[in-house]
Image: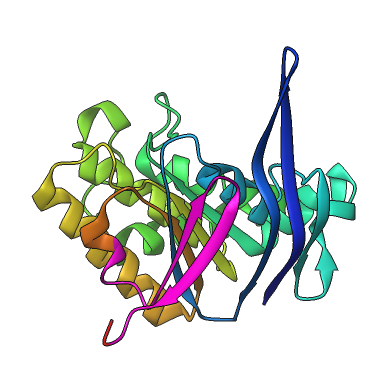
C-alpha cells in the first residue's frame, strides 16, 4: 500500500519556483486501480515517477508497504524498482536491436534469474499478452500495439506488486487503445496488481474505480460508481 503525506515537488527555472506538487496526501491500497489526470505539465508524470522511485519529492514522504522511498539510497531504490514495480511508457522504450523475447528478458537480469529461466519466463509473458508467435521479432517488425504488448510483458515478467503506466495508449489509434487497455485490465485482475495510470483520455478515466485529478499542484480524488 502507498501512503503519501505532504508530498511537494518544486522546480527552479531561472528566478521562478514552480510547484509541480504542493502538499499532496494520498492513499493507494493494495490491488487498487487509480487513474491520474490533469492539464499538461501539471505534475501527473512527476507524481508517477515518484511512486516508482524514479524521482524524489522536495518535501514529504512516499511510503510503499511502510518503506519511505524518499529516504532510500539510489542502490536500495533500484532494488525496490527491480523487484516490486513494473513500468509501461507511452514510447514503449524497447531496445531496437533486441527481439521481443530479449527485451522482456532484460527485466529479469537485475534479479539474477538464470538464462534458461529468463527465456522461459519471457516466452510465457509474451504468450500471456498474445505475442507467442512474435518472440523472435525486432521492434521495427511489429506494430505500435504489438510493441506496447512487449512493454507490458516486460513490466509483468518479474511479477511486480505495482504496475505504473504513463500514457500507455498515447501513441495508439482508438482500436489499438482499446486492445491495450483490455490487456492491462486483464493483467490487473489476474495478478492482483496495484495499477496506477496517467492518461489524458477521459473515456479511459471514466472506466477506472478511482480518479485523481491534479491541478495547480493540488490533488482531488473521486470514486467512479459502477466502474
Which residue extends farthest top? Answer: 14
What residue do we see at 39% from left, 54% from top? 152
Q: Is residue 131 left or right of residue 95?
A: left
Q: How many marks?
A: 0
Q: Check the image and name the residue furthest to the left.
A: 175
Q: Which residues are magenta?
A: 205-225
User: Is 92 placed above or below 115 here?
Assistant: above
Residue at left offset 31%, top offset 40%: 136
Q: Quick one: 90 or 76, which is closer to the camera?
A: 90
- Image height of 182 relative to 29, above or below: above
Quarter of the image for residue 68 reads bottom right
Q: Is residue 132 visible?
A: no
Residue 142 visible to an observer of this rendering: yes
At 76% from the left and 48% from the top, the residue drawn is 78
Question: Which quadrant would the N terminus be assigned to in this image?
Answer: bottom right
Q: Is residue 115 left or right of residue 165?
A: right
Picture coordinates of residue 84, whole percent (x, y): 66, 64
Q: Residue at x 37, y 71 (%)?
A: 187
Q: Is residue 42 magenta?
A: no
Occupied quadrant, residue 188: bottom left
Left or right: 150, with 25 as reference point: left
Amino acid at each position: 500500500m502507498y501512503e503519501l503525506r505532504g508530498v511537494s515537488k518544486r522546480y527552479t527555472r531561472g528566478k521562478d519556483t514552480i510547484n509541480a506538487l504542493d502538499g499532496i496526501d494520498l492513499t493507494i491500497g493494495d490491488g487498487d486501480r487509480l487513474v491520474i489526470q490533469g492539464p499538461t505539465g501539471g505534475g501527473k508524470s512527476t507524481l508517477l515517477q515518484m511512486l516508482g522511485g524514479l524521482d524524489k519529492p522536495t518535501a514529504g514522504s512516499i511510503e510503499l508497504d511502510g518503506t519511505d522511498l524518499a529516504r532510500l539510497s539510489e542502490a536500495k531504490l533500484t532494488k525496490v524498482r527491480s523487484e516490486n514495480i513494473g513500468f509501461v511508457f507511452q514510447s514503449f522504450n524497447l531496445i531496437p536491436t533486441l527481439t521481443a523475447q530479449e527485451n522482456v528478458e532484460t527485466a529479469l537480469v537485475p534479479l539474477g534469474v538464470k538464462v534458461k529461466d529468463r527465456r522461459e519466463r519471457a516466452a510465457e509473458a509474451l504468450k500471456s499478452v498474445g505475442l507467442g508467435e512474435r518472440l523472435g521479432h525486432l521492434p521495427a517488425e511489429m506494430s505500435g500495439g504489438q510493441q506496447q504488448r512487449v512493454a507490458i510483458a516486460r513490466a509483468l515478467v518479474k511479477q511486480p506488486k505495482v504496475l505504473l503506466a504513463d500514457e500507455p495508449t498515447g501513441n495508439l489509434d482508438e482500436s489499438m487503445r482499446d486492445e491495450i487497455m483490455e490487456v492491462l485490465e486483464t493483467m490487473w485482475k489476474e495478478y492482483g496488481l496495484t495499477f496506477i495510470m496517467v492518461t489524458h483520455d477521459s473515456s479511459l478515466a471514466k472506466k477506472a474505480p478511482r480518479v485523481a485529478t491534479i491541478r495547480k499542484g493540488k490533488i482531488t480524488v473521486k470514486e467512479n460508481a459502477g466502474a
